[in-house]
Amino acid sequence: MKRAINIAGALLLAAGVQAHAAITVKDDAGVTVTVAQPARRVISLAPHVTELLFAAGGGSHVVGVVSYSDFPPAAKKIPEIGSNRDVDLERIMAMKPDLIVVWRHGSSERQIEMLQKLGIPMFHSEPQQLEDIADNVQKLGHLMGTDAVAGPAAASLRGRIASLRSRYAQRPVVRSFYQVWDKPLYTLNGRHIVSDALRLCGGENIFGTLPVTAPVVSIEAVLQENPEAIFATAEKNYGGVSMWKPYRTLTAVRNGNLFTVDGNLLNRAGPRMVDGAEQLCEKLELARSHRGK
């Protein structure tokens, strides 16, 4: 009897150790991230990261966010600790986080280095392909111990992406210009995740081969490339696609393929980007229907 009690006690002890076993994943920088136990106090240093954490089932664990973290609506109630480029380090320390999720492209290197010195586990989120968004959801859920939510959410995203790829993979290519801003005229190169969404839909980024991620281009360069479709987001104090209407020699203008897309869906590498990709695919299909008219 005593031996049975000892065995039962040993099993309970082992279960307790296993429940608090360290959790390890690899982030988008290829760095191994380890938390001693599921993270319960998480700080998000990018709006898209906030969306990823909520999608992974960890919204209640997020204790600090940066400005523009406005989705889902519950994120607006979380205390702000600065912007993605300038955070309040003292406030972060006071919040006693057990995980910080950063955006390498948006955060300053100096700031990341200072955060690393705090010794708090840090996950770098930099999705470059749509599938990376699903991977981020799953990995962040694993770090927070919310796998029961994160797993199905990631699977759903992967299924939707696969469905789009199956539907549009064989469609005729549409050479496209994606306009981030007009003054100066910014676009994105082929390594950016927006270009991956374009490729998924059968689009081709006319400036995909440029070495800079977010290069400034000239109107003359766009005219020379003569895209069949032009995309821009609807923002305040921003001309958008209307600036191209006077250039009637452009194929995109001639065929009526000046499209406005939702920047919140396409310019943030969060789960809603799959919604943005669906919109992008529909507009590219519309551009195909305009051929020969």
Image (cartoon, rainbow, N blue to C red):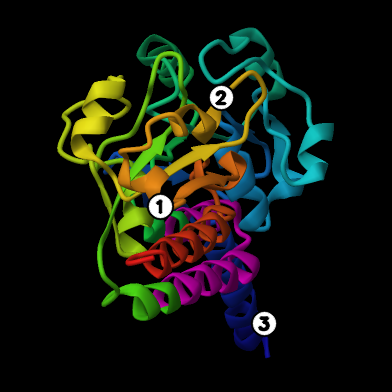
Q: Residue at x 42, y 69 (%)?
A: 289
The 10 Å Cα crowd at callout 1, few under 14, some 14 to 19, many 20 or more, is some
The 10 Å Cα crowd at callout 2, few under 14, some 14 to 19, many 20 or more, is some
Judging depth in this view, the residue of 273 and 153 nearest the camera is 273
Judging depth in this view, the residue of 59 and 39 nearest the camera is 59
Mark 3 lies on residue: 5
Q: Which residues are magenta?
A: 134-162
The 10 Å Cα crowd at callout 3, few under 14, some 14 to 19, many 20 or more, is few
Residue 120 at x, y = what percent?
A: 50, 28
Mark 1 lies on residue: 24
Q: CA distance from mark 3 to mark 1?
A: 33 Å
Q: Residue at x 65, y 15 (%)?
A: 82
Amino acid at pointer 1: Thr
Q: Residue at x 32, y 53 (%)?
A: 196
Q: Residue at x 26, y 36 (%)?
A: 189
- Per the rendering, the mark at residue 207 is none
State which tag comes first along the sequence, 2 or 1. 1
Q: CA distance from mark 2 to mark 1?
A: 46 Å
Instruction: Name the quarter where the N terminus is drawn.
Output: bottom right
Above or below residue 115? Residue 279 is: below
Residue 93 at x, y = what percent?
A: 63, 17
Amino acid at pointer 2: Gly
**Disc nearest the viewer among 3 and 1:** 1
Instruction: Name the quarter where the C terminus is drawn.
Output: bottom left
Q: Secondary structure at mark 3?
A: helix
Residue 91 at x, y = what percent?
A: 69, 13
Mark 2 lies on residue: 239
**Disc nearest the viewer among 2 and 3:** 2
Q: Residue furthest bottom?
A: 1
Judging depth in this view, the residue of 273 and 142 nearest the camera is 273
Tell me, yes or no, if residue 36 can be seen here: no
State which tag comes first along the sequence, 3 or 1. 3
